Image (cartoon, rainbow, N blue to C red):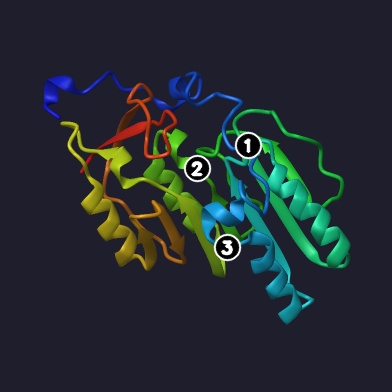
């Protein structure tokens, strides 16, 4: 893309007011398991991961943070299952989303559904699992959020997120995909370019200054509108 074709870039505050980002359709109907689910998108069921930890050590204190949780349907289903199967577990599930469009209110103290910007929020304590299902497509400073999410991890914690490195551009509009992928892998994270997903435990640092984002870039690989983010490397 030539330099003169680079669009006007939005800062985070303006971006979050755009129709692409501040929508009520993102991640709304996705459940915990089944055809349209977290298990299908991530390649594993978050409930199973945490349940295995509890079976191995019932005294474990576990936290799952889900960024851009949408309606919270998957988290509400997980809350109900943990209440049935592990009623004494010391477990916290936190879902955060920019839009207050939750399917229901939490039924137990285990679940917290928060309406806030993922770019400014910080967790109360370290997490054993951090997920972001098709949420990074709508974030402006994606690299900063990836750095933040990995910083939330406990020593044995894991992050899993849908992420398309093609949505990261240099000032002239050319792709920075190769640089991003290299940094993720150097940090110890696995990046699957076919599934467009990062996974694992690691603390990447991106030597790039965020310039702004373009919410008018059109559909990403999912077929839905996505935000393209620009950085000075």
Q: CA distance from mark 3 to mark 2?
A: 15 Å
Is residue 18 or residue 44 the one in the foreground?
44
The percent position of residue 135, horizontal first and vertical second, equals 50, 40
Foreground of the two, 203 or 196: 196
Residue 127 in view of the camera: no
Q: Residue at x 53, y 64 (%)?
A: 158
Left or right: residue 80 versus residue 22 is right
Disc nearer the start of the sequence (3/1): 3
Quadrant for the C terminus in the image:
top left
Residue 15 lies in what quarter of the image? top left
Residue 183 lies, with reference to residue 24, above or below; the image says below
Q: Residue furthest bottom?
A: 56
Label 2: element kind: loop
Nearest to viewer (mark 3 / mark 1): 3
What separation in Å lies between label 3 and label 1 (alpha carbons)? 19 Å
Q: Which residue is mark 2?
A: 134
Q: Which residue is mark 3?
A: 44
The answer to which quarter of the image holds residue 84 is: bottom right
Residue 70, label in figure = 1
Which residue: 47% across, 23% down?
20
What is the x, y in percent for residue 47? 69, 62
Disc 3, disc 2: CB below 8 Å?
no
In the depicted structure, whether residue 96 falls above or below residue 35: above
Give the camera-side residue of 10 and 26.
Answer: 26
Q: Is residue 40 left or right of residue 203?
A: right
- Disc 2 + disc 1, Cβ < 8 Å: no
- In the structure shown, which secondary structural element does the residue marked by tag 1 occupy? loop
Identify the mark nearer the N-term, 2 or 1.
1
């Amino acid at each position: 893309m030539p330099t003169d074709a680079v669009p006007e870039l939005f800062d985070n505050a303006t971006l979050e007011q755009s129709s692409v980002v501040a929508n009520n359709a993102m991640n709304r109907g996705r459940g915990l398991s089944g055809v349209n689910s977290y298990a299908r998108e991530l390649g594993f069921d978050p409930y199973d991961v945490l349940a295995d930890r509890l079976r191995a050590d019932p005294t474990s204190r576990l936290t799952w943070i889900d960024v851009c949780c949408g309606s919270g349907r998957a988290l509400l289903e997980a809350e109900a299952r943990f209440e049935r199967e592990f009623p004494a577990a010391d477990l916290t599930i936190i879902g955060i989303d920019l839009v207050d469009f939750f399917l229901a209110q939490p039924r137990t103290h285990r679940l917290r559904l928060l309406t806030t910007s993922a770019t400014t929020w910080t967790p109360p304590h370290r997490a054993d699992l951090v997920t972001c299902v098709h949420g990074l497509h709508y974030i402006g400073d994606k690299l900063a959020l990836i750095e933040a999410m990995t910083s939330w991890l406990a020593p044995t914690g894991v992050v899993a997120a849908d992420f398309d490195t093609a949505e990261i551009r240099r000032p002239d509009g050319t792709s920075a995909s190769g640089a991003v992928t290299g940094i993720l892998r150097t940090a110890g994270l696995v990046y699957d370019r076919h599934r467009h997903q990062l996974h694992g435990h690691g603390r990447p640092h991106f030597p790039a200054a965020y310039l702004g984002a373009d919410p008018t870039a059109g559909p990403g690989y999912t077929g839905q509108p996505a935000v393209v983010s620009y950085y000075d490397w």
